[in-house]
Amino acid sequence: MKRLSLVLVAGLAAACIAPKAPPLRGELAPARLPRLEMPALHRKLIFKWTYRDVDYSFHGDGAARIAPPDSVRLDFFIDGGLGGGFATLIGDELTTPGPDFVTKMLPPSPMLWAALGRLRAPALADTVVRIDGDTTRADIGHDPRWRAAIVAGSLRGLDVIEGDRLSQSLARTTTGDARYQHYRGKRTLELTITRVDTVPDFDASIWH
């Protein structure tokens, strides 16, 4: 019985360990990254979303209203008419007025920008860039390291590496779908884009 308990504890401890970060692949290149900013037009993205952690699972519909160069409002509606909430991201300031589930499920602002295709990793020294075909990968900073992956001029991933292990990951597809994972917190948020509209300017009230 004691041996079984030790095995279970060891198994649970292993499950909590974040995966090891792979080495940075490709040929060494000058430490310069392309500027990845939002298109210079107002857009409204409609998406499906799913959030999971060890205690909860939510899913529903959502919308992102994007005003270049650096403002976005995100609205989340839980399926079944169970409520909703919103957040604003202006520059690097993420505001979540409520309810609590929005605060809990959203990643930090650099990851949220990455989900929309904008690279806003912290400005840190010790940047290493490598190129592998049409893929540019970069490690920014030391510990933690922010690792960006850019394919054919489009941001496809942003990771946070602590020590030699992945702490957080954001992956994007060619269609703009995104999946955020917080390994130690055992949290995931998935966004599936269903429509993208170009729209007129937004009313200033949406930012409050």
Image (cartoon, grey):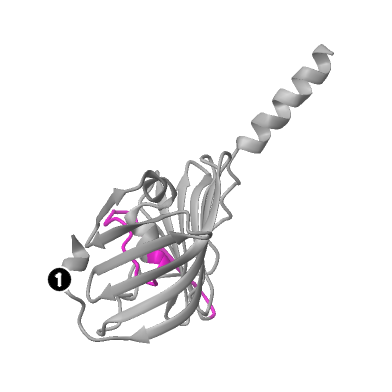
Q: Can the viewer see residue 84 in this picture?
A: yes
Residue 168 image point, x, y percent: 48, 50
Asked which secondary structure carries label 1, the reply is helix
Quarter location, residue 205: bottom left
Q: Residues within 10 Å of mark 1 (few under 14, many from 20)?
A: few
Could you tell me the amino acid type at mark 1?
A: Ala
For this view, does 41 lie left or right of residue 139?
left
Q: Residue at x 39, y 51 (%)?
A: 102
Residue 101 image point, x, y percent: 42, 47
Residue 59 image point, x, y percent: 54, 58
Q: Against 171, is 56 above or below?
A: above
Q: Residue at x 47, y 54 (%)?
A: 82
For this view, does 79 lie left or right of residue 208?
right
- In the rendered image, residue 87 lying in the magenta stretch gets the answer no
Quarter location, residue 90: bottom left
Q: Which residue is mark 1?
A: 204
Q: Nearer the viewer, residue 108 or 145?
A: 108
